[in-house]
Image (tube, rainbow, N blue to C red):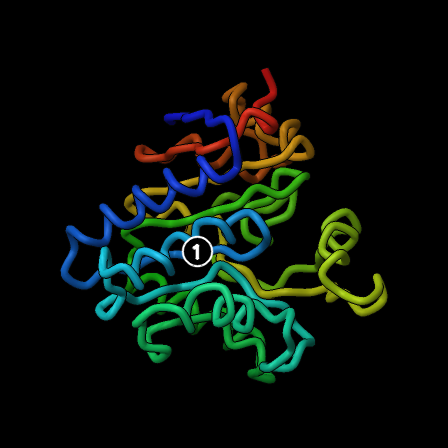
Amino acid sequence: MEIKIFDTYNDVSIEAANIFISTIKNIKFPVVGLATGSTPEGLYKILSDSYKKGIVSFKNVKSFNLDEYIGLSKNHPQSYRSFMNENLFKNIDISLENTFFPDVYDENLSSCCHNYSSLLKANKRDIQILGLGVNGHIAFNEPGTSFDSLTHVVNLTEETIISNSRFFESLEETPTKAITMGIHEILDSSLIILLVSSKNKSAALKKILDQQICIDCPATALLSHPNFIILCDKEAYPY
């Protein structure tokens, strides 16, 4: 594990973009793992600007997102497909045919999970971007999730639903289920970057920095990865 602490969220985003760009530039056909939520928005803005400046191309990139809500339409503005289209994909030269999400619109969710697992197994990520949940979740792997888990349907915890409700008009409209990449699949990446910002993430970050691997804090599974970097701002740093 390596940790880098920065003064501001923008500094975190800049460093994440530098690592991301240098990684994919050295690979002919890069495979990347992407996260949603407010934390990676700064990273995606810098990646978009870097493409427009001719610094990087995403033409040969394949992307795999961590998760997707169950119960939203494909075009719902808060679906993760819509989030990625708005914050990154529409601004760069990636082919949408090379952008992958769990197919939550398949009536057979078990088949959806199996198919996504198969895709992930065949496409090891060269770099995986992660955010950190206030309860220590990564993707939608809530506390208590096995570290051997593969893509699966998850019932979101009340804490996660309340946290996500800020993106919806009401708590009642906030999805309660999702399909998420499993912890075992997240770990099957060559490089993992965990982005952490804001004071409300400091308790979860402390559990990682204390280096006590515990199923009650899914993010501590990352401690077993040989190439794991934490980028955090001073507000999130717990010491």
* Residue 176 quadrant: bottom right
* Residue 91 quadrant: bottom left
Residue 200, relative to residue 83: is it above or below?
above
The residue lying toward the viewer, choosing from 184 and 45, is 45
Residue 90, relative to residue 63: is it above or below?
below
Q: Residue at x 47, y 70 (%)?
A: 101
Percent x, y for residue 136?
A: 62, 38
Residue 195, relative to residue 1: is it above or below?
below
Residue that label 1 marks: 44
* Residue 62 quadrant: bottom left
Which quarter of the figure is the N terminus placed in? Answer: top left
Q: Which residue is drawn at 63% across and 35% down?
A: 198
Q: How crowded is mark 1: few (under 14 residues within 10 Å), some or many (20 or more)?
A: many
Q: Which residue is drawn at 30% across and 72% down?
A: 93
Q: Residue at x 29, y 63 (%)?
A: 123
The residue lying toward the viewer, choosing from 235 and 215, is 235
The residue lying toward the viewer, choosing from 122 and 199, is 199
The residue lying toward the viewer, choosing from 52 and 125, is 52
Q: Is residue 115 left or right of residue 36?
A: left
Q: Is residue 215 left or right of residue 111?
A: right
Percent x, y for residue 81?
A: 52, 72
Residue 94, relative to residue 227: is it above or below?
below
Task: Give the residue at the far bottom of this rendering.
Answer: 107
Which quarter of the figure is the C terminus placed in? Answer: top right
Percent x, y for residue 88?
A: 43, 64
Identify which amino acid the numbered label 1 is placed on: Tyr
Q: Helix, strand or loop at disc 1?
A: helix
Percent x, y for residue 144?
A: 64, 42
Q: How many labels does the image show?
A: 1
